[in-house]
Image: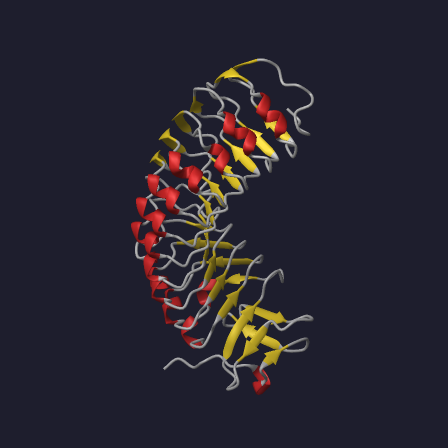
């Protein structure tokens, strides 16, 4: 039977002078000015917060089986290396798992989907490989999932549509392929969907228009094709919409002006044609409008002059006529 790790001196919190023998002696920690290790009333370790302490050591030598009451595991911004131990599946109470900005490698163990209490996961900026676990949809309490810059491949699991409590999903800067699953439209609480800089192809599913709470939608720098769904203008809480660096064709939705809260609109480097819709003049909160490197035609609308908060305007490399007057907003074009 594996012996549990306990706090020294049976104190509920280890502070300035307390030491933790961590990772089976590979790393020793001296907490400095904050509670790095917190224990429950019976002395069992419940919270580990070792963020930004310049620590280095192999994560795979830690036996998670000895931490059955762990709730938070935070080791962000260090130099831990090795793989995530399969024993992570034993942390039945784990709620917060933040291991971003380290040198971790290997696959994400499938046992992670057993952690039904998980609320937030951040794996950003590591050197993992493999794919997102297909059964990730079992993590029904998950609100925050960030896997940015982790060298992941494969497709977005269809089961991700079951993560109905998600408010933040960031899979940017990986090698994720396949299409955006239609099931993504089931994430009604989602506020941030960031899939930029992957190898995602196919069309943008109409179901994207069901994400009525979304404020940031970034699908840029992929291989998306087809038209921009007209119902994307139903996402009236949007502040950032970035679809640039794809192969989208057709026209900019005529009702784009419905996105009254939009501050950043990036549609550059696509194959969009037709004219700039007049309703774009209703986007009075815009600070950046980038439509460059398309095949837009017609005249530059006078209504753009009503965009008084505009700081960046790029309409270059199109087939537009007329010149941009210096009176347009506060823009730099």
Marker count (numbered): 0
Q: Residue at x 30, y 57 (%)?
A: 135
> Which residue does the image show at 48% across and 72% down from the upper left?
71
Picture coordinates of residue 91, whole percent (x, y) = 41, 71
Which of the pair 82/284 is nearer the observer?
284
Residue for point 58% across, 13% down: 322
Answer with left or right where residue 155 lies relative to residue 23: left
Q: Quadrant of residue 304?
A: top right
Q: Pinpoint residue 267: horizontal percent, then vertical percent.
A: 49, 30
Vertical order, 93 against 219 (above or below): below
Q: How is the image coloured?
A: secondary structure
Q: Position of residue 95 (x, y in %)?
A: 45, 68
Q: Quadrant of the N terminus?
A: bottom left
- Identify which residue, 5 or 135, lies in the foreground: 135
Give residue 100's position: percent from left, percent from top. 52, 55
Left or right, residue 114 beside residue 218: left
Please identify the quadrant where the C terminus is shown. top right
């Amino acid at each position: 039977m594996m012996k549990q790790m306990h706090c020294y001196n049976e104190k509920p919190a280890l502070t300035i002078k307390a030491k933790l023998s961590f990772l089976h002696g590979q790393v020793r920690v001296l907490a400095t000015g904050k509670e790095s290790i917190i224990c429950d009333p019976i002395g069992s370790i419940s919270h580990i917060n070792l963020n930004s302490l310049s620590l280095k050591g192999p994560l795979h030598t830690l036996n998670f089986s000895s931490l059955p009451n762990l709730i938070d595991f935070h080791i962000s911004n260090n130099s831990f290396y090795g793989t995530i131990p399969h024993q992570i599946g034993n942390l039945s109470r784990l709620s917060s798992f933040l291991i971003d900005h380290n040198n971790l490698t290997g696959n994400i163990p499938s046992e992670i989907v057993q952690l039904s209490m998980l609320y937030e996961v951040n794996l950003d900026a590591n050197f993992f490989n493999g794919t997102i676990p297909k059964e990730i949809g079992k993590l029904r309490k998950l609100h925050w999932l960030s896997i940015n810059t982790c060298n992941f491949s494969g497709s977005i699991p269809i089961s991700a549509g079951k993560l109905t409590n998600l408010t933040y999903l960031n899979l940017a800067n990986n090698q994720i392929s396949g299409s955006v699953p239609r099931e993504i439209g089931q994430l009604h609480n989602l506020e941030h969907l960031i899939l930029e800089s992957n190898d995602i192809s196919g069309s943008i599913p109409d179901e994207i228009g069901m994400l009525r709470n979304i404020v940031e939608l970034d699908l840029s720098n992929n291989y998306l094709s087809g038209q921009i769904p007209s119902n994307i203008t139903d996402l009236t809480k949007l502040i950032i919409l970035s679809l640039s660096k794809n192969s989208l064709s057709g026209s900019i939705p005529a009702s784009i002006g419905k996105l009254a809260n939009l501050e950043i609109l990036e549609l550059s480097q696509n194959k969009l044609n037709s004219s700039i819709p007049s309703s774009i003049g209703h986007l009075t909160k815009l600070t950046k409008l980038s439509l460059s490197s398309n095949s837009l035609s017609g005249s530059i609308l006078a209504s753009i002059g009503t965009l008084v908060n505009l700081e960046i305007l790029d309409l270059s490399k199109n087939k537009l006529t007329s010149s941009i007057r210096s009176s347009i907003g506060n823009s730099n074009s």
